[in-house]
C-alpha cells in the first residue's frame, strides 16, 4: 500500500538525540508513513541505532552512505520516496504526535501543494514558540504564492526588514509537507552546502514555490527545533561564508532573471544581502582564536565587498527600529569598529532572549 507520507531524516553523528527523533516519527498518529533514514557516514553509534530500530519497524528504511553533507543525504532520500507527500525531520529535533496527520488532512482538504506549520525552539531548560503573527489558517493560491511566499523567501520588502532575525523563518523544510509529484517531476533537489554555506532549505523552497499553486499555513506548533546541540552545523565558524554566500546570491539573481520575476524580487534580494551582513558578522564572532583587531579587519573586508556596497544603495534605513537602524547605518557607511561592537551587544542580547 502506498504511504501517505514519506519522511526523510538525514543523519550524521547524532547518537545522543536519534532515539528521541525516531520515536516521535514512528509514533505518529497517521500510520501510513515511510521513514527514510539516511546515515551520512556517521562515525558514532548512529548507524547501529538505526539498524536496531529497523528490526522492529518495517516502515523504517535505512540507507548507509559516505559522508556528503545534509543536502546530499536529503537528495539520496528523495530518490527513495514512494509516498504521496514528503516531509523532512532533522535528527536532533522531534515532532508532535499529530503533526503529519494535521498536515496531511489539511493538504487533502485544501488541495494544497505545500502545507506549513509553526515550530517551537527547544533550549533544554526552556522552550520558545516561533511567532509568525498569522491567522489560525491562511491559504495562498496562484500568483499569491509568488507575491506572498516566493518573494518573501528571496528577501524582505518595506517594513519586513524591521526584523532581520525572521529573514529565513519561512524557509525551513522541516516545518512543511510537500506534494511529492511537484518535487519529483520538477527535479527539485538541495544544493550542496559546500557551494552556498547555508540556506539550502530556503533555496529549495524558492524552487518549490515557483511551481506551487496552493500553499496553506496553519498556526499550530507541531515541530520541536532543538537549539542546544553544540555540534550542529549552525553553531560552527564558517571561514568561507562570504564567498559561499556570494555563490548563493548569484544563484538567486540567476533565478530571478531566468524566471523574469521583476524588480520587486531584485530589490528583495538586495535587501537580503544587506540584512545578511548580520549573519556574516556573527559568523566572525564565532571564531574563538582571533583577536578583536583581526575580527574588525575581516568585518571591514566584508563591508567593502562590492556587491554588499551596491546592495546598500537602495536600502531604506527608515524602516528599521532605532537599534537596527544604527547597526545597518554602520554597515552602509562601512564603519567596521562600530559594527563590531554592536554585533557583540546584539549577540549577548540574542543569547539572553533565547
Image (cartoon, rainbow, N blue to C red):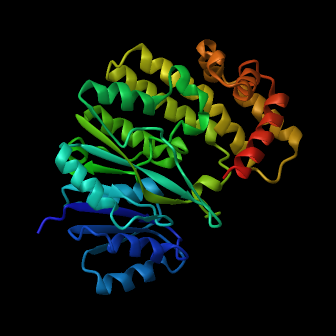
Say if 256 sits above or below 340 in the image: above
Q: Left or right of 251: which side holds 129?
A: right
Q: Quadrant of residue 167?
A: top right
Viewer-proximal residue among 336 and 129: 129
Viewer-proximal residue among 101 and 342: 101
Q: Left or right of 68: which side holds 107?
A: left
In the displayed image of the protein, which residue is found farthest to the front? Answer: 136
Q: Quadrant of the N terminus?
A: bottom left
Residue drawn at x 41%, y 25% is 254
Viewer-proximal residue among 112 and 184: 112
Q: Quadrant of residue 154?
A: top left
In x, y percent, where is residue 239? Answer: 68, 46
Residue drawn at x 55%, y 22% is 159
In x, y percent, where is residue 263? Answer: 42, 13
- Residue 187 appears in the rendering: no
- Residue 336 appears in the rendering: yes
Amino acid at each position: 500500500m502506498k504511504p501517505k507520507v514519506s519522511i526523510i531524516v538525514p543523519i550524521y553523528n547524532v547518537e545522543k538525540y536519534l532515539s528521541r527523533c525516531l520515536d516521535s516519527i514512528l509514533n505518529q498518529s497517521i500510520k501510513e508513513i515511510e521513514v527514510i533514514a539516511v546515515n551520512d557516514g556517521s562515525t558514532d553509534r548512529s548507524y547501529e541505532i538505526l539498524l536496531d530500530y529497523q528490526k522492529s519497524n518495517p516502515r523504517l528504511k535505512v540507507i548507509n552512505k559516505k559522508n556528503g553533507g545534509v543536502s546530499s543525504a536529503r537528495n539520496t532520500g528523495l530518490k527513495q520516496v514512494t509516498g504521496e507527500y514528503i516531509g523532512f525531520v532533522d535528527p536532533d529535533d522531534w515532532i508532535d504526535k499529530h503533526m503529519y496527520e494535521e498536515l496531511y488532512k489539511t493538504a487533502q482538504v485544501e488541495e494544497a501543494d505545500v502545507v506549513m506549520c509553526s515550530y517551537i525552539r527547544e533550549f533544554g531548560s526552556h522552550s520558545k514558540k516561533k511567532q509568525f503573527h498569522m491567522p489560525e489558517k491562511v491559504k495562498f493560491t496562484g500568483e499569491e504564492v509568488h507575491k506572498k511566499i516566493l518573494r518573501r523567501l528571496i528577501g524582505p520588502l518595506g517594513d519586513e526588514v524591521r526584523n532581520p532575525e525572521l529573514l529565513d523563518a519561512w524557509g525551513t523544510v522541516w516545518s512543511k509537507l510537500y506534494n511529492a509529484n511537484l518535487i519529483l517531476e520538477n527535479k527539485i533537489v538541495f544544493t550542496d552546502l559546500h557551494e552556498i554555506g547555508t540556506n539550502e532549505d530556503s533555496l529549495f523552497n524558492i524552487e518549490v514555490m515557483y511551481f506551487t499553486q496552493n500553499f496553506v499555513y496553519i498556526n499550530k506548533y507541531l515541530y520541536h527545533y532543538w537549539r542546544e546541540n553544540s555540534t550542529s552545523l549552525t553553531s560552527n565558524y564558517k571561514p568561507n561564508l562570504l564567498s559561499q554566500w556570494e555563490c548563493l546570491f548569484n544563484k538567486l539573481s540567476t533565478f530571478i532573471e531566468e524566471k523574469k520575476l521583476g524588480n520587486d524580487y531584485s530589490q528583495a534580494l538586495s535587501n537580503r544581502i544587506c540584512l545578511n551582513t548580520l549573519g556574516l558578522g556573527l559568523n566572525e564572532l564565532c571564531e574563538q582564536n582571533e583577536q578583536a583587531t583581526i575580527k574588525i579587519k575581516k568585518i571591514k573586508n566584508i563591508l567593502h565587498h562590492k556587491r554588499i556596497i551596491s546592495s546598500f544603495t537602495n536600502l531604506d534605513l527608515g524602516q528599521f527600529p532605532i537599534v537596527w537602524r544604527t547597526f545597518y547605518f554602520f554597515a552602509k557607511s562601512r564603519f567596521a569598529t562600530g559594527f563590531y561592537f554592536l554585533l557583540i551587544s546584539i549577540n549577548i542580547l540574542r543569547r539572553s532572549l533565547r
